[in-house]
Amino acid sequence: MATPRFKQLRRSYGFDEVAIVPGDVTINPEQTNIDLKLGDFTFGIPVLASAMDAVVDVSFAILMNQLGGLAVLNLDGIQTRYDNPREVLAEIAQVSGAEVTPLLQKVYSQPIKENLISERIQAIKQSGAVCAVSAAPANAKRFAPIASEARADIFVVQATVTSARHLSKSSRGLIFPELVKSVTMPVIVGNCVSYSACLELMQTGISAILVGVGPGAACTTREVLGVGVPQITATIDCAAARDQYHKESGRYVPIITDGGFRKGGDLCKAVAAGADAVMIGSIFAQTKEAPGRGYHWGMSQQHPALPRGTRIKVGTTDTLAQILFGPTSVTDGSQNLIGALRTAMGICGAATIQEMHRAEMVIAPAISTEGKSWQLSQA
């Protein structure tokens, strides 16, 4: 007897479950164009550094821009709560595992100082770097004018999940069309993982969208809330929304796959799935220049009684320049990410990021089942 189904689930895919099919034509990797355009800004590499306190401080933001990418400074974090953030970062790195969650809750309970927002932005701008800053939706209306006055270049509104229609007790909550009109800089919004949510966000006039809920190495959303969609499926769905919106409006809104990256192959797969750029956290937390001192933890969670992301030990591997451009000293794909992207594009015959979106992808066995067990056992 047929039984009615309350919910019909569809299969979704993460990085390890797919592969890119080589193209019929190949091109030289150095002939590929991987520029990223955000508003009036053009970046030489399609890579953003996550707005996480263990990843981005003023110095890291400047260096990332010098290398062709963009780093986002977290205005809700340690950099704007403490006059001397290095002391706090050192304390987080040194505390025991049993004590770290209460410490993080305490650290992020201190008030944000508006003067520090301006000071951090100005420090980045004085170097000549493009300055991108991030705020949670609850603080976006308050921080946007401060960031604009301090001459920030890009404003990011970021939460675990962000939608164009948020219901709250306040009748005048954050309204994205109003925010976009109130500042002269591009506004990037995240995070989302579905076609409909992405399409509605694009219709508000924002300049780019962050895609990803739950995949990050230091993210606890899937465990704590049970919410999230694997990154390949999320990217494909949001890329479909981008293309539909472009068809309807004539305006192209880049999507940025955010979180879950471990190796160059993951970056290549995200772009093949439709991403215009990627946002990376834990890999960059491993660099010698990262402020986390070999540790990484999630962004501050607004609920005071829930974990604020778990601290993980990622270690320190090499410089940011080597992670991005090599030369690589390892064989696991965790270095020379840009070289990997250009090579994959060349193999697929894609001269641009948008051409790479058309690369064929297949559902594939996990790499550990396809003859790589010897490599993994000796890692």
Image (cartoon, helix red, strand yellow):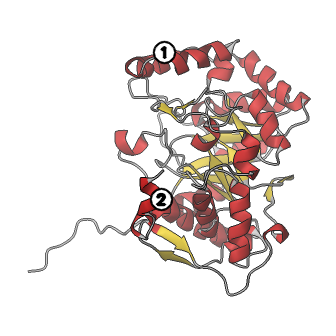
Taking the view exactly as shown, the residue that stands out farthest to the bottom is: 24
**Gap between marks 1 and 2, in whole Å?**
43 Å
The image quadrant of residue 307 is top left
Q: Mark 1 points at which residue?
A: 106
* Left or right of 198 on screen, residue 119: right
Q: Mark 2 points at which residue?
A: 375
* Left or right of 88 on screen, residue 231: left
Point 52% across, 17% down: residue: 94
145 or 112, which is in the foreground? 112
* Left or right of 361 on screen, residue 63: right
Point 81% across, 34% down: residue: 62
Q: Is residue 14 visible?
A: no
Give neighbour class at mark 1: few <14, some 14-19, many 20+ (Cα, 10 Å): few
* Left or right of 253 on screen, residue 30: right
Give residue 124's position: percent from left, percent from top.
83, 30
Give neighbour class at mark 2: few <14, some 14-19, many 20+ (Cα, 10 Å): few
